[in-house]
Image (tube, helix red, strand yellow):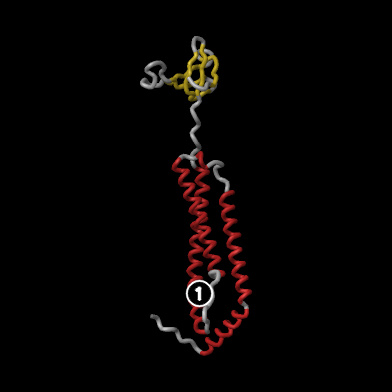
Amino acid sequence: MTPARRYLPEELERAQQRLDAMAENQLQIARQQAEGWRNFLTVASGLLAAVLVLKGRENVAELPGGYRAAVVVLVAAGLVLLLVAAFFAVSAAHGRPGEELTYAHAAKLLDWEEGERDRIASRIRVTRWATVLGVAATASGILLTWVSPGPDEPARTVQVHTRGQTLCGELLAVDGSGVTVKIKPAGPGEGKGAATIRHLTWQHDAVSVAPADTC
């Protein structure tokens, strides 16, 4: 067990004066702690609201699977880290609620103050790193929604009317020269043969194109 530190009479006298002042202002100290924790709740609510209203992709569910998981993990981790930073910052500034010195005397007050300085320093370090990492994680998650590829458009099925027949298939391209479609094999062997890609020129091959629900 570490022996108790010995203090000079002047240190003990000044500590006793501070202890007397603290004893006379217990109500004020309690109110300051309550105000600190109220501010913490305000900060925590503000952080949550800020993360939720940040604008990235309108619908994260539309992102590809890997990008969607990365965005969710980054934003969630950023929110947790920011909440941790806010909690430790308030704890460093206002202490733990209900904390008191039982059977206090001057030497005990000086011991408590020394331990409190170490505790505050460690919480400030946690606050600094949690804030930096939280902001970086949240910003990375939002930026990832900007650079991730968009959802694949569903295949568009069309009917191409020619002078002699009507072809049905998946629309690949259409421009001023004609229309390109992928035509799957039809009939009993459907699904076994290879699909064919045909480019039909306007007027010579294709007359018109119309959307179709299915072939």
Residue most extreme to the front: 103
Q: Quadrant of the N terminus?
A: bottom left
Q: Position of residue 49 (x, y in %)?
A: 59, 52
Question: Residue 32 appears at what percent x and percent y?
Answer: 61, 70
Q: Residue furthest bottom?
A: 9
Residue at 48% across / 73% down in the picture? 118
Give the x, y percent position of residue 172.
48, 25
Q: Is residue 43 above or below residue 106?
A: above
Residue at 45% x, 22% y is 182
Name the foreground residue: 162 vs 45.
45
Q: Position of residue 40 (x, y in %)?
A: 58, 62
**Residue 28 vs residue 15, the one in the foreground:** 28
Label 1 sits on a secondary structure element that is helix
Q: Which residue is painted at 57% across and 56% down in the image? A: 47
Instruction: Classify 41 as above or below 22.
Output: above
**Badge count:** 1
Quadrant for residue 35, please give it: bottom right
Residue behind mark 1: 116
- Left or right, residue 168 beside residue 190: right
Q: Is residue 157 above or below residue 58?
A: above
Residue toward you, 102 or 180: 102
Q: Amino acid at mark 1?
A: Glu
Label 1 packing within 10 angstroms: few (<14), some (14-19), many (20+): some
Q: Residue at the spot x=43%, y=84% of the render? A: 4
Instruction: Give the image quarter of residue 191.
Output: top left
